[in-house]
Image (tube, coloured by chain):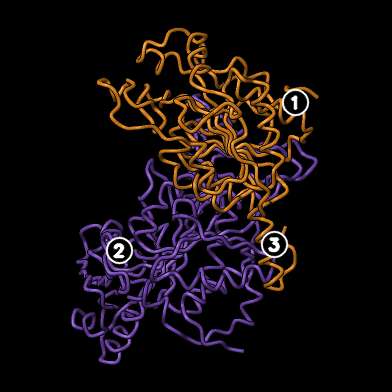
Amino acid sequence: MSIFTYINEAKLPTFWCSGCGHGVIIKALAQAFDELELPTDKIVIVTGIGCFGRSDDYFMTNALHTLHGRAIAYATGVKIGNPDLTVVALMGDGDASSIGGNHLIHAARRNIGILALCANNRNYGMTGGQYSPTTKQGDKSATSRYGLPEPEFDLAALVKAAGGSFVARSTVFHYHNLVKYLKKGISRSGFSFVEVMEPCPPMYGKFNELGSAPEMIQKIREEVIPLSRWKPDSDRKPIGILCDVDKTSYTDAYDEVIRKAGGKDGN
Amino acid sequence: MKKFISGNEAVVEGALIAGCTFYAGYPITPSSEIASHLSVRLPQIGGKFIQMEDEIGSLAACIGASLCGHKVMTATSGPGLSLMLENVGMAIMAEVPCVIVDVQRGGPSTGLATKVGQGDMQQVRWGSHGGYPIIAMTPSTIEEVVKFTIEAFNLAEIYRVPVFVMTDKVIAQLREDVDLDSLQNYPITNRKIAGSSEEFLPYRAETVTDVPAMSPFGGPHLVRASSTTHDQHGRPTSDPEKIAFKNERLFRKIQDNSDSICQYQSDLMPEAEALVVSFGISARSSLQAVAEARAAGKKVNFLKLLTFWPFPDKAVQDAARGVKKVIVPELNWGQAAVEVERVLGSQIDVIRINKTNGLIIQPEEILEKL
């Protein structure tokens, strides 16, 4: 097997802009599937809307391409509908945390056994680079030309606080760690969340004069620090596995409901 | 044996007879008993119940579970319906069978949470953007609620669409005797499933009225379902021919089958001078008014709509033949009446009886117009 067991080679190159991190992320995910030797027909990729919402088109797995912000809600139905499936929700930062924020926190609280992957490029690329909940305070965007007055959301911290059982953050530069976290996230029975910091050169990069893609990636490296060296007063974001606790997943807990109700196993 | 059950309980019984194994919903008056009962009943048969974070998530979860092969349902009332509408469009475009029960209350907005209304009839027709046909049932007795909930599941499965069961606050809480034992044998239709050995396309269609066979996630085929306008592989397309085929098919798979979808009860008499057209709770008041008018020697036709969408144009034309006036009682400002006027043109006087004060229409209010 190879990553091309999972990636639709005929669809390459991707439609994403030069320097975009999305292609790196879907490669990392395909590599995680490959190393876990998952059968393609037992994987369901669920996407929302936005540049990263097009990801499903590159996969040779089952796919559910849905509405803006709702990927996790559909993924919840798929996982409950067939708990044997590996269900992965792929979302951008606006998709996952702005319009979809309510589904994100409740999926984490409920501990539904899906992997939610957020490609965080700090803006809405597809619609022209508007600010998102993860745009840095003071930064410029198509809708914050004077600098953004709002502080940013720390998504990994949010999901950890909401009860997610596995939470990790990486960047497209830290590729091998990213693959490792995706494999762990997929393997956990509860809710897993992996946030990936990545550049959006033609939008966020342009508005904030951050330079070329390599220069943007270098700046992202400087924004993060491994969790082992991170301190609460640090102005850098921790990368690594921020939370990994073994908690009963929603579907396992619901099996207990079925047992109490006297029903047979509904899987 | 007959059981004395409410309209909301009747929805539950109908759903279980139809084979519902998944329910996702959010609490809202006056629909909440449906969720309460199914939270007990579904796990008893190994089915799944989940209370989602909102109505958007509820219908989304239903769509996800339906694609795994479950028969799915959600129930709500006006404010929740407004939130669900984007997913009605999703179920239309991705062609996902699901049943949505709307227990109507007075509106607009939060409106009258505990009082009756029929103000969502046009919303379910036109509520989600882009334009598409819809199927909506309007039972008016408790036995009909059971039957038409089953019918809603059958139609959802046949046409791969969301189907509405439109009740209201009064029908939800009204109790009548229903012979549930005999209804256990009501005909059930399941979705067409693609054979495991054949080459599978998730949206395979030869003609513009075809309904593609399905295959569940985790089954023998790779499956793609999409909210984006797609080709037969379920992949996004910008080819005008493929776009036109998909959109025409979404329209015509329902439109061309309107005659077989539409159900109604027509009670006509020779030389009738008036026609009463009604549905749901207002049809019950109308039935009483028509009986009293006939007892007083008046010649009156009665048409009860059991399928509101597609609107049964031909049934209205037939029932209105020769009459001088058509009376349309309903708990809104004329949502059925505009359809009756559209069907009949300007030849016949259409008299609207509209009530939006949270109370049902009394038979006398109809009788005085006859």
Residue A5 circle label: 1
Q: Which residue is mark 3?
A: A255
**Image quarter of the C terminus of chain A:** bottom right
Query: Same subunit under labels 3 and 1?
Result: yes
Question: Nearer the N terminus, badge 3 or badge 1?
Answer: 1
Q: Colour of chain B?
A: purple
How crowded pointer 2 is (Cα within 10 Å; few <14, some 14-19, many 20+) is rated as many
**Image quarter of the N terminus of chain A:** top right
B22 to the left or right of B88: right
Residue B106 x/y as whole percent: 28, 68
Q: CA distance from mark 3 to mark 2?
A: 40 Å
Is the residue A157 above or below the residue B87 in the image?
above
A57 to the left or right of B222: left
Q: Nearer the viewer, mark 3 or mark 1?
A: 3
Residue B205 x/y as whole percent: 61, 39
Q: Which residue is mark 2?
A: B119
Q: Amino acid at mark 3?
A: Asp
* Residue in the picture at 41% in, 14% down: A205
Q: Residue furthest bottom?
A: B295
Is the residue B261 above or below the residue A83 in the image?
below
Chain colored orange:
A
Callout 1: chain: A
The quarter of the picture where residue B312 lies is: bottom left
Callout 2: SS: loop
Q: Nearer the viewer, mark 3 or mark 2?
A: 3
Q: CA distance from mark 3 to mark 1?
A: 33 Å
Q: Amino acid at mark 2?
A: Gly
